Amino acid sequence: MPPYVQAALICDKVLIEGDGTFSIIRAIDRVFAGAEFTEKDPLLFTCHLMICVRPSASEAPAPVQVRIEIISPSGKRQMIGDKTVAMASFGGANLNNVLVVQFGTPGVYRFVISLNGQEASRVSLDVVAGAPAVGAPAPADAG
């Protein structure tokens, strides 16, 4: 079995303690641009993409190639990260990726995480033009 993604989240901040544990602050799946933006005048957005990679139970921890791509609402793919990481002695790797991303159009962007050339997970971010409506209800739970 190949390695797998145990967790992947887009968030504002990741705190990493001295013992290596981490806290994810403000996980997000939607961002409001506050103003209109275009391909010529894109929205620049800084975030963290926290990825926890684990080996399968049947293999010794070996280095893993982690690739991150973004798929725009129009289907255009853009590579934003590609590195090989060692698995720690506890049997995994926690990757805190600080990203500065350009968004040219509103819509849902998908962050695709591949391990050793195989798609392992996707995380979505809905990029909305304008500001949230005051007093707007929170989105309904899907489950």
Image (cartoon, grey):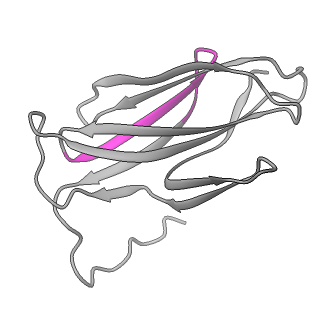
In front here: 30 or 34? Answer: 34
**Direction top: furthest residue:** 117
Q: How many marks?
A: 0
**Direction front: furthest residue:** 18
Which quadrant of the rendered structure holds the C terminus?
bottom right
Residue 110, image x, y percentages? 40, 38
In front here: 48 or 53? Answer: 48
Compared across the picture, whether 90 is left or right of 21 comes to right
Residue 118 sits inside the magenta stretch: yes
Q: Residue at x 33, y 38 (%)?
A: 101
Asked which quadrant contains residue 71, the reply is top left
In front here: 10 or 89? Answer: 89
Residue 108, image x, y percentages? 31, 45
Asked which quadrant contains residue 139, the reply is bottom left
Residue 63 sits inside the magenta stretch: no
Compared across the picture, whether 81 is left or right of 131 comes to right
Q: Is residue 8 above or below residue 91?
A: below
Q: Residue at x 88, y 20 (%)?
A: 59
Compared across the picture, whether 79 is left or right of 123 comes to left
**Majority secondary structure of the magenta segment?**
strand
Q: Is residue 121 above or below residue 140?
A: above
Asked which quadrant contains residue 2, the reply is top right
Q: Which residues are magenta?
A: 106-121
**Direction bottom: furthest residue:** 135
Residue 77, image x, y percentages? 33, 23
Q: Residue at x 34, y 23 (%)?
A: 78
Q: Residue at x 22, y 56 (%)?
A: 33
Residue 11, image x, y percentages? 49, 54
